Image (cartoon, rainbow, N blue to C red):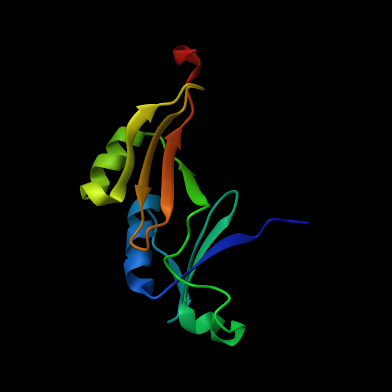
Amino acid sequence: MSFASIRIVTDDLDGLVAFYEQVTGQQAERPAPVFAQFSGPGATLAIASTATVAMLGGALAPATNRSVFLEFEVADVDGDFAALQLGSDDVVLEPTTMPWGNRSALVRDPDGNVVNLFSKPTADQG
C-alpha cells in the first residue's frame, strides 16, 4: 500500500487554499474549480469543496475536526509562524521547543484545523 493524500473538505475552498499556499510556499494545483492539491515529497494535501462529497449524504462535515492535525516540517518555525500574521484565536501554541527537542508552533487554518509547523533539532543542538 502507498499512502496517497490527506483531503480536507471545506465550504471555503479559496480561503483554505490561500492559507496552505502561504504555509507551503507553493501554488496549489487546481485541476477543477472545486478541488486543489499540494504535491510534494511524502504526501499530497488535497482540499475539496463540499460539492465533491455531496453523494456521501453528510458523512463529511467541514470545519469539525477535533482529533487530527496536519504537520509541516519547516526550516524556520519562528519565521514561518511570524509570516502567517495570525490573530490570537488562530494560535494554539506559540513557537516552543518541545521536551523531545523539536521546535513547534501550532496554529488553526481558516476551518479551525490544527496545523503544526515544526523543525527537528540540528546536530549542534544535541
Compared to 110, does 101 lie above or below?
A: above
Residue 106, given in percent of the width and then of the height, sits at 38, 42
Q: Residue furthest bottom?
A: 55
Residue 62, given in percent of the width and then of the height, sits at 45, 70
Tell me, yes or no, if residue 3 can be seen here: yes
Compared to 42, does 6 lie above or below?
A: below
Q: Where, by quadrant of the figure, is residue 57 drawn?
A: bottom right
Compared to 8, does 1 lie above or below?
A: above
Q: Where, by quadrant of the figure, is residue 79 drawn?
A: top left
How many marks do you count on the picture?
A: 0
Instruction: Decide if residue 74 is on the left or right side of residue 3.
Output: left
Residue 59, given in percent of the width and then of the height, sits at 58, 76
Residue located 57% across and 49% down the image: 41
Compared to 4, does 94 lie above or below?
A: above
Task: Between residue 51 and residue 25, name the one nearer to us.
Answer: 51
Instruction: Decide if residue 35 is on the left or right side of residue 105.
Output: right
Tell me, yes or no, if residue 85 can be seen here: no
Residue 93, given in percent of the width and then of the height, sits at 34, 38
Residue located 43% across and 43% down the image: 116
Residue located 33% across and 33% down the image: 95
Give the quarter of the figure containing the N terminus: bottom right
